[in-house]
Amino acid sequence: MTISCPNNICFVGARGIYKYIFIIKLNNKIREGEAINNRFMDRLGKWRQFLLSPNLVGWLMCMPALVFGVLFFLVPAFVGFLISLYDWDGVTSMTFIGLDNYIEVFKIHRYWNAMLVNWLTFFGCLLTQIPLALFFAITLSKKSPIAKVYRSAIFAPRMLSVAAAGLLWSLVFDPYEGPLNQLLEKIGLESLTFSWLGEPNTALISLLIASSWLYFGFHMIIFMGGLASIPKEYYESVQLDTNNGLMVLWYITIPLLREQFLISFVIVFSGTFGALIGFFSLMTGGGPSGSTELLGLYMVSQAFRANRFGYASAIGVITFFIVFIVLLWPVIQTSRKRLEY
Amino acid sequence: MKKYSITLLTIVLFVVLGFSAFTAAAEQKIELKVWDVSFNEGYVRWWKNYVKEFNKANPNIEVTYETYETEAFKAKTAASIVAGTMPDIFKLNPGAIAFKYYTEGKVLAIEDLYDVSPYMPGIKEGCSFNGKMIFHPLYMVPFAIYYNKAQFAEAGIDLQKWADPTQPTWDEFIVACDKLKDAGFTPIAIGNASNWPFLAWVWILQNRFGGTKELIDAVSGVGSYTSPGFIKAAEVAQRFAQSGYFPKGFSSIGGNSMYILLTQGNGAMFYFGTWVIGTIKDNAPPGFEYGVFKFPSFPDGNPDSQRDIYSVLTAFAVSSTTKHPEAVAKFLQPLTTSYDVMLSYIKEASVIPAINGILEMAKTAGVDPVMLTVAQHFAEAKHGFGAWDWVLPAPVAEEMLNMSQPLSMGTITPKEFCERLEAKARQK
């Protein structure tokens, strides 16, 4: 800017004003930049803090399991849900049918039969495996050589594969050559020599016996871990008032094993709707007459025999939600009230 | 100097690596994988030997032969087809399910790979779609009733007293069953854990009452699964199953246990395919003698069907994902061109290949006489039909299999069996 002025002083003044305004504006810009820079540095700082923090190590440690879980559980579950909205035989192209598969599932008697079998299996396993496991955990928690031998013997079945265990029990229950019927005949109980896996009335009970033998040792170990963590002072203080073992069990031991009960409950429930499928498939295939057909077996037969992958996926999705809803509530409740000694 | 040495070394390294890759590629063998079902040891032995000899004769081809139990095999194959990971060659039974694989491009037609003229015309038709031969027939397994001669003699049953010693009437057959029961034997060896063995009775009974036309009409939708032949077949089968002729707990007997019921003495008669001949050879105690006769006839049944035979036709399919169709053709073709190979197949595997003239050759080649008898029955039959669980569409087949145990145990009525089958077949 120039101002017409009679002498150089005006010119110098104008330049000065201009410089002053320029400097002010520059300072403002610098302060603005600094502010932006500070915000950037803050954000960068948080990342820097994160990158340098111990949490990163934890996240990196969890990453393989998380990736595995996402790739092999979440993604297939989502794909399964998508397939359930289609009519698909696995060979020809897929036809979108919306929720028709779900509507059909709820109308089929065989589905409700499988649901009933699944719940009966769950309660059967729960009422046999957990009490047995608790009983042996308490009885064998003593430090003696004999107790160690018994603990190993009870846990040993868990070392067998499901296939080996299924084959073993199929031989035990064989109506002609099986040792069970042969023993019953020898002790004069021929009237009890059933075809254990061949009659609808005895097949499910036989499978419950076999699966309890296979799995209760694992629950025993869980309870033993819980028992070992209960402070002895609790028992000592109770013993000042009473020697009644049942009262000690009911008021001290069982409440303090709450988390172990929850773990076992989760394992039994999820196993009934999942892991037991292989065992039941090997031994009876869901028969005779659907008396041991779990939801999982029904789903597999619809997928790989009837070639109805959409319908089978709908059964899978429904089963997933059943398991999720049933297991979510106790897990949340227990995690809120953490047990501390 | 050092710089030049490093450069020279690098060049030499690349040359060596490149040469190795080239030679490795040149030496790389063609690998073929074959999936099959193991139903008796002789069959598996024969195939393993055939593969071994083939690999020896063709050093640039490596064939791997894998066998599985029947029910596990069905699920494995179905899963691999969906996933597109089929082996180069796999076993299946031609029918609605199998032909769908072809129309959807999952399998190749063998007619495009090698000459198919040696096959028997009827078998060729069974493996063809729209006149083109798709599957390679492995063998036919006609069903007949194999019986324990010692238990028959002890029960006082003399086949010569039947009007036709090679085929009793149903009434003569029931009399024989009652005599066996009275003598303390289990008349019928059957294990129905996998559902289809009892259904094999339903299928042949439907054929006796309604004939193959009634079946074809029902499958095509022109007729119905509630036609009189179907209902009567289900009634007779259920009544037979409830008469105490089957072993205790037959619904839980399956797999290999089923095959050895006859040789263990836990069933005097076994309605089954020629596979049982190989099982008897492998498992029967010394001195075990057995005979064979056709499934009983019904004088009041369909006059055209009383000599019909239920026969499993098993084939190999060539996967469309195979990278070496020429090698596959080289592997399969001797099975149609070499009579020596086929004769050894009959003798060791106890199955009947589907090649023209093989039956006549087998008569003079020392093949098991029981096998020859069954082959003769097959040749005399007016019609044959395959396993319904492969012929019917998959959802209908699965529903039928699911109802097998309830029908045999009396928890559903024959009419309900037929009505549910019809409803499933017509469901859209």
Image (cartoon, rainbow, N blue to C red):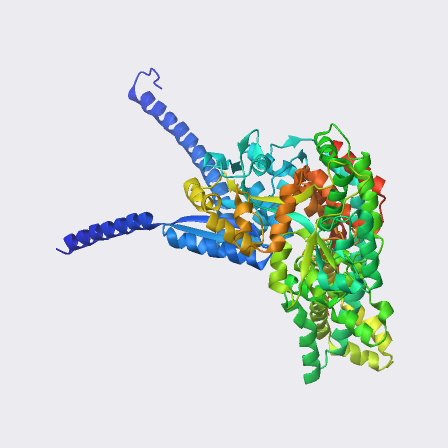
Residue B123 falls left or right of residue A200: left
Q: Which x, y percent locates residue B385?
A: 67, 40
Q: Is residue B246 above or below residue A79?
A: below
Q: Is residue B129 above or below residue B365?
A: above
Q: Which x, y percent locates residue A192?
A: 85, 68
Instruction: Say which residue appears at 47% left-offset and 47% top-offset.
Output: B339
Location of residue B382 (image quadrant): top right
* Quadrant location, the C terminus of chain B: top right
Residue A225 falls left or right of residue A13: right
* Quadrant location, the N terminus of chain B: bottom left
Q: Is residue B102 above or below residue A188?
A: above
Instruction: Say which residue appears at 60% left-offset and 51% top-offset.
Output: B372
Instruction: Say which residue appears at 79% left-offset and 81% top-offset.
Output: A236
Q: Which x, y percent locates residue A71?
A: 56, 47
Residue B158 falls left or right of residue A45: right
Instruction: Say which residue appears at 68% left-offset and 63% top-offset.
Output: B263
